[in-house]
Amino acid sequence: MNRFMDIIMLVIMVPTVLILFFYEYPKKWIEKNYIFGVWNRAEFKEKNASEKIDEITFSCRKQAMIIVILSLIFMAAICFIPDFTTRMIIWTAFVLLDIILLNIPLMRGNGEMKSLKTELGIASKKGVTYTDLKSVDSVHSLKISRVIIPTVLAVVFFIVAVLSDLGVVKLNDIFGNSAAYNRHLMVGMTGSLLLVGLMLVPIAIMMDRFRNQVISEDSDINMNYNRAKKKNMADLSVLFIWINTVSIILMMVVMSIWDEEILFLAMFALYMLVLMIGLAVFCTRNIAIERRYRKDTTIEMDDDDNWVLGQFYYNPDDKRLNVEKRIGVGATINMAHPVGKAISIVLGLVIIGMFIMLIYVGILSKTPMSIRIENDSLVCHQMKDDYVIPIKSMDEPMIGLESGDLKLHKESGYDMDPMYKGRYNVNGFEDCTVFINYESSHYITFYYDGSTYFITGGTDEETVEVFDQLYAIWKD
């Protein structure tokens, strides 16, 4: 099961790395509108400039290729790490850091291209924008119904999942899997997918409402170019929303029939694979569109200095919050906009918080669980006292011999193999409290304050010793 998580990460990361490489580091720069975020102008086609750009693009592409190869090797190496918690922490950190590393050659290329502009005596026209009044409001490719219909369908199925969890609809009973934890899990997973779908709807509308790009003095060319670009984006958005909806329906059917986590993970892996295929098709079509209209481009949008490192847009004179990315897919924010500044700060804090959380989880996963008797109470400790249970208030405690026979389904809490703690469904019984290290085969169980507890120490010796003390105090 744990190894299946590695497969999911590979399904996500391998296509992502390859798409980034082929999209950001093309072999033929002459066919692109932008070279590392710098507008590809007529002066660059001249012999001396062209030779220098060949050197820059070749060097950056070679560096990016090395990073891609090392990334793929590192991904394979992660899969051989025996400890599951360590693998997941490394995977999470790797996802963030690898995307940054893959963009370092691009950022270097952006700096070298701007230096080349200075060397050629080309000055950027900072703040200049062009508007084609004839086509400014006439080019849209997204029919709202195409995103509303699958979204409404997803909402309906999510409501059915909630009603099933509340017992109003006997969905699970019809198919034969009525475990409460499965109904809770169904609501959580379908709700997560629905949230993704709901976020995609305004993003799709926003992308379709972007200010049209002006690449030519001919309005018909501008309209056709923007129509092709927006249709490609609209098709991608509709595909993603439908994938979410279909996944919600399939997830509900599967979870109503079977209680096998590997099936849920397999479905998630398939979900991510289809998304990646859709993204690859989008990128391929987008490249074809740029190549098709490259020869028709007669107006140059020279605001290179507003693009920091070719990736981040900063223009105080532009009142737009969102602008289409020069490199990659979708949009980015104007970091000079007041809202853009706030978003940038929040995003930075989220990334910092994520790394702090990774450090915390790493420390927690390496901190052993322990139990002890203190002041006539059973104390369960891992970094802090998680549970302090008065012995005289619990029902008769018993000791079990095989913790491996306990089938755990988390409702809330912590689950980093071999340590589990929190609220769980245990062997079909709901609302159980778990504090278990599977390295101890013996476990203590008792009923207290409306919950059945399953507790182990770090070792069998510790569990048995504490149980003997506990039982003596309880019996006295």
Image (cartoon, rainbow, N blue to C red):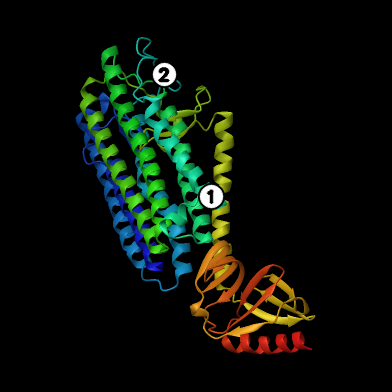
Picture residue at 57% right of the left edge, 58% below the top:
357
Disc 1 versus disc 2: nearer the observer: 1
Instruction: From the viewer's perspective, tell me whether residue 396 is left or right of residue 423.
Output: right
Give the x, y percent position of residue 323.
44, 28
**Amino acid at dot 1:** Ile
**Residue sitting at the far top:** 134
- Which quarter of the figure has residue 429? bottom right
SS of the residue at dot 2? loop
Crowding at label 2, few (<14), some or many (≥20) Cα neighbours within 10 Å? few
Q: Is residue 39 above or below residue 446?
A: above
Q: Is residue 230 above or below residue 447?
A: above
Q: Residues within 10 Å of mark 1 (few under 14, many from 20)?
A: few
Residue 240 lies in quadrant:
top left
In space, the residues marked 1 and 2 are separated at their CA atoms by: 33 Å
Say which amino acid is labelled 2.
Answer: Thr
> Which numbered marker is on residue 129?
2
Residue 405 image offset from top left, x and y in percent: 49, 78
Q: Quadrant of the C terminus?
A: bottom right
Examine the rendered structure and indicate whether residue 309 appears above or below residue 39. below
Q: Residue at x 29, y 16 (%)?
A: 216
- Residue 196 in sight from this viewpoint: no
| Residue 179, horizontal then vertical, whole percent | 50, 62
Q: Do the residues bearing badges 1 and 2 touch, measured as CB atoms within 8 Å?
A: no
Q: Which residue is mark 1?
A: 351
The one nearer the camera, 132 or 381, is: 381
The picture places residue 162, in percent across and down from the top left corner, at: 53, 47
Judge by depth and name the residue closer to the eye, 416 or 295. 416
Q: Nearer the viewer, residue 69 or 165?
A: 165
